[in-house]
Image: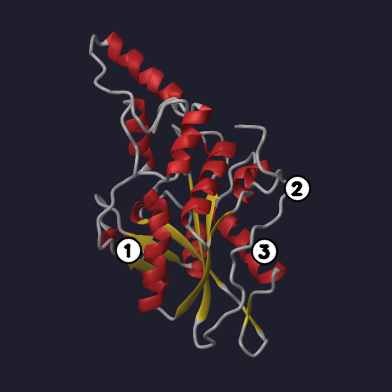
Amino acid sequence: MASDLPAHSVASQTLETYTFPHSRLRLTQSNPDRQGLILVAPGSYSPITHLHLRMFEMAADFAKFNTEFELLGGYISPVGDAYKKKGLAPAGDRLRMCELAVDETSNWLMVDPWEALHTEYMPTAVVLDHFEHEINEVLGGAVMPDGTHRHIQIALLAGSDLIMTMGTPGVWSENDLEHILGRYGAFCIERSGTDTAEAISSLEKFKDNIYVIQQLIANDVSSTKIRLFLRREMSVAYLIPSPVIRYIEEHGLYKDDAASIKEKEKSKGKEISGRASPAICSSESKS
């Protein structure tokens, strides 16, 4: 990661200098008949895609038209390096890519570095507790039209693939499920290849706290597929935000993956079919 980060960048923070981001958080609630809501989406974000961003917009529409919530903000919370997932870029790089993405595309989303700054793995329940503390205890919750303060509901935003794992016996502890789904609840975006109804059926006791959101326009982009395209030297233009593409190029991210797959293909005597992508090319080239 570049050392010349802007002073205000979340990627330049440490746990010692950490401050909770709330510049885009709307704490003044306009409708007293609705419950204030904050969406939190933990994840790898290696790299962040347009679908990650689109998930927030789908959830915002759903909350507006199908619930009694008033959405006040949304947070991206990248996991720390201790997650040890294959293809995981360093936390600082993922934070910066997320920051570039929301700065380019949104006027209400924020990136919180707290989870990513920890050297140990932070469970989802602990991450949600962090937001509960910062928003409702430190900031005092929502300010109502009459000047009173009211608790803001924190909720998990996730794809249906994550909810599927919650419905699989032995993957999540009962205490964690009770804490996440019972106390906070979840907005679940349907993903292709997952049976959301089956997942929800095994979480019957939490059904009133799980909001299933259909994708009216199917989008199956994933970070895994983006990394595959990059390994094959294929274009990822219009699949991830342009500033993220430039950051990947400038910092040589995911090149080790590309080199590894080339070696494997060569060892098998196969030709590489990839091409030099105009989206991942020298910054000196004409665009």
Q: Nearer the viewer, residue 179 or 57?
A: 57
Q: Are marks 2 and 1 in contact (CB under 8 Å)?
A: no
- Name which quarter of the figure residue 224 lies in: top left
The percent coordinates of residue 64 (x first, y second) are 40, 76
Q: Residue at x 32, y 15 (%)?
A: 264
**Visible in this render: residue 88?**
no
Visual colour scheme: secondary structure
- The residue carrying mark 1 is 200
| Helix, strand or loop at mark 3 | helix
Q: Residues within 10 Å of mark 2 (few under 14, many from 20)?
A: few
* Mark 3, residue position: 134
Which badge, 2 or 1, is on the more N-terminal residue? Answer: 2
Q: What is the three-letter code of the residue carrying label 3?
A: Glu
Front in this rendered view, residue 18 or 162: 18
Q: Tag 2, which secondary structure?
A: loop
Q: Quadrant of the N terminus?
A: top right
* Location of residue 272 with respect to 60 vertically, above or below: above
| Left or right, 2 with reference to 16 | left
Quarter of the image for the C terminus: give it.
Answer: top left
Q: Could you classify mark 1 by the number of other residues whose Cα lies within 10 Å: few (under 14), some (14-19), or many (20 or more)?
A: many
- Between the C-alphas of marks 2 and 1, the distance is 40 Å
Farthest residue in the right direction?
16
Residue 276, how many percent across, how many down? Answer: 33, 24
Labelled disc at residue 80: none
Q: Measured from the top left, where is residue 136 in percent x and y?
A: 65, 71
Query: Picture quarter containing residue 217?
Result: bottom left
| In the rendered image, the vertical position of residue 218 relative to residue 117, given as above or below | below
Task: Give how far apart the Cα atoms at labels 2 and 3 are.
Answer: 15 Å
Report, in whole angstroms, how far the alpha carbon at label 3 lies from the one at label 1: 30 Å
Q: Is residue 281 above or below residue 25?
A: above
Amino acid type, label 2 = Thr
Picture disc at residue 17? 2
